[in-house]
Amino acid sequence: MENKKAKQTFDYLEKLFKNPDPELKYSTPFECLVAVILSAQCTDKRVNEVTKVLFKNYNTPNDFAKLKQTELEKMIYSLGFYHNKAKNIIAMSKQIINDYGGKVPNSSKELKKLAGVGEKTANVVASAVFDENVMGVDTHIFRVLNRLGLVNQKTPEKTGEEFSQKYPEHLNHDTHFRLVLFGRYHCTARNPKCEMCELKTFCKYYKEGKK
Ligand code: SF4
C-alpha cells in the first residue's frame, strides 16, 4: 500500500514538473556547494542574485581561501547569517585545498567533513552534482512527505532515513527537485492547494481535516 501511494505521488509530481531544474544557479560542484551553504534560511532567488555577481570574481576554493572573512561578509551580507556563512565558506575552501587537492569531495560522507556542511547540504550537493542516491531533506521535503504519510517522522534527518529505507527506487535528484517545487508552490506551509491536489485521496494531512 505504501509503495502504491509512493508511486502515485511520484507519478503525479512527474506530471506536474516534467523536467525539474534546481532553482539555485551554479556551474561547478564548488559553486553548488557555496550556493547551498548560502541558501540556509534564505530564498534561492536571493542567493542567485548575490552569486551572479560573486561568482564572476570568486568561484574556486583558492579564490575564497585568500579572502578575509570581513571581505566575504560584505559580499553576502544581504543573505542573513553572513558571519557564519563567510567563516564556513573560507574554512571549507581551505579544507578542500589541504585535504582534497582542491577538488570538492564527491560523496556525501566526505562532504559532511567540511566546515559548515551538515547532512542536508552534503546530500543536496552529492545528489545534484555527483548523482549519489541520497536525499537532502529540506523544510519543504520534510513537510510534504510527512503530510502525505509516506513517512512519519519528527525531524528532517529521520525523514531522510525512513524515506531512503522505504523508497530507495525514488532516490534521485529529479525526485528531490520535484518534492522541493511541490512544497514551495503547491503543498505550501500555509494554505496548501489541496482542492486541486490529486494526492488528497490518500493524503494523511488532508484526511485528518487539518486543511
Ligand atoms: S492534499 Fe494538500 S496537504 Fe496533501 S499533499 Fe496535496 S496539497 Fe499537500
Image (cartoon, rainbow, N blue to C red):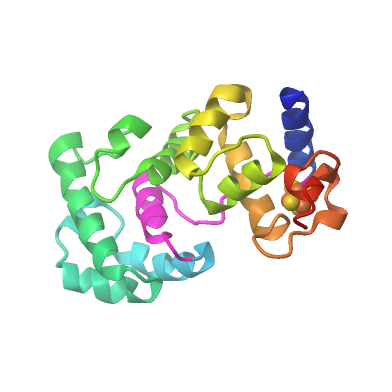
Q: Position of residue 130 (x, y in %)?
A: 44, 33
Quarter of the picture holding the N terminus: top right
Query: Residue 101 is drawn in which quadrant?
Result: top left
Q: Say which residue appears at 40% left-offset and 56% top-offset.
A: 35
Q: Does the magenta stretch include residue 30?
A: yes
Q: Where is residue 18 in the image (x, y as percent from the top left)?
A: 74, 43
Query: Residue 202 is drawn in which quadrant?
Result: top right
Q: Where is residue 68 in the image (x, y as percent from the top left)?
A: 14, 67
Q: Is residue 140 magenta?
A: no
Residues in magenta, as a range? 16-42
Q: Can residue 17 be seen at all in this image of the molecule?
A: no
| Viewer-closest of 4 and 32 | 4
Q: Say which residue appears at 57% left-offset and 32% top-offset.
A: 172
Q: Where is residue 132 in the image (x, y as percent from the top left)?
A: 46, 29
Q: Say which residue appears at 86% left-offset and 41% top-offset.
A: 201
Q: Say which residue appears at 63% left-offset and 28% top-offset.
A: 170
| Viewer-closest of 154 and 136 | 154
Q: In the image, is residue 133 above or below residue 66?
A: above
Q: In the image, is residue 89 above or below residue 132?
A: below
